Image (spheres, rainbow, N blue to C red):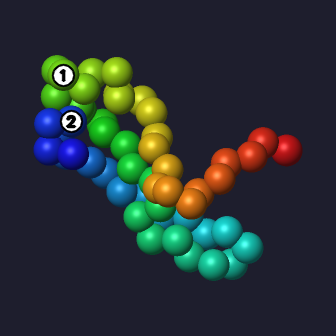
């Protein structure tokens, strides 16, 4: 989203299947989105589980 700043996209590989741009983060978010700093957001359909 433009109001957050410049997004950095990350690809994942799950069970050998590449998922391009499955996650994003904001290294230097704009002031209104400062809470996004240091967080990673996953695209719809990506489920994260800890083992």
Q: Residue at x 35, y 29 (%)?
A: 36
Q: Which residue is mark 2?
A: 4
At mark 2, the secondary structure is helix
Rendered position, 46 above or below 19: above
Callout 1 crowding tier (Cα within 10 Å): few <14, some 14–19, many ≥20: few
Classify mark 1: helix, strand or loop. helix
Residue at the image position 61 percent from the left and 69 percent from the top: 13
The extreme right residue here reads 51
Which residue bears the numbered disc 1?
A: 32
Please identify the quadrant where the N terminus is shown.
Answer: top left
Q: Residues within 10 Å of mark 2 (few under 14, many from 20)?
A: some
Tag 2 and tag 1, C-beta contact below 8 Å: yes
Where 7 falls versus 34 (above or below)?
below
Question: In the figure, is residue 5 to the left or right of 25?
Answer: left
Q: Position of residue 25 (x, y in %)?
A: 37, 43
Q: Quadrant of the C terminus?
A: top right
Q: Earlier in the sequence, mark 2 or mark 1?
A: 2
Please say if 44 is above or below 17: above
Outermost residue toward the bottom in this view = 17
Q: Residue at x 21, y 36 (%)?
A: 4
Q: Position of residue 39 (x, y in %)?
A: 45, 33
């Amino acid at each position: 989203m433009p109001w957050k700043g410049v997004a950095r996209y990350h690809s994942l590989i799950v069970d050998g299947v590449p998922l391009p741009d499955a996650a994003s983060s904001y290294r230097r978010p704009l002031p209104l989105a400062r809470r996004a700093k240091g967080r990673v957001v996953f695209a719809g359909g990506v489920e994260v589980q800890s083992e």
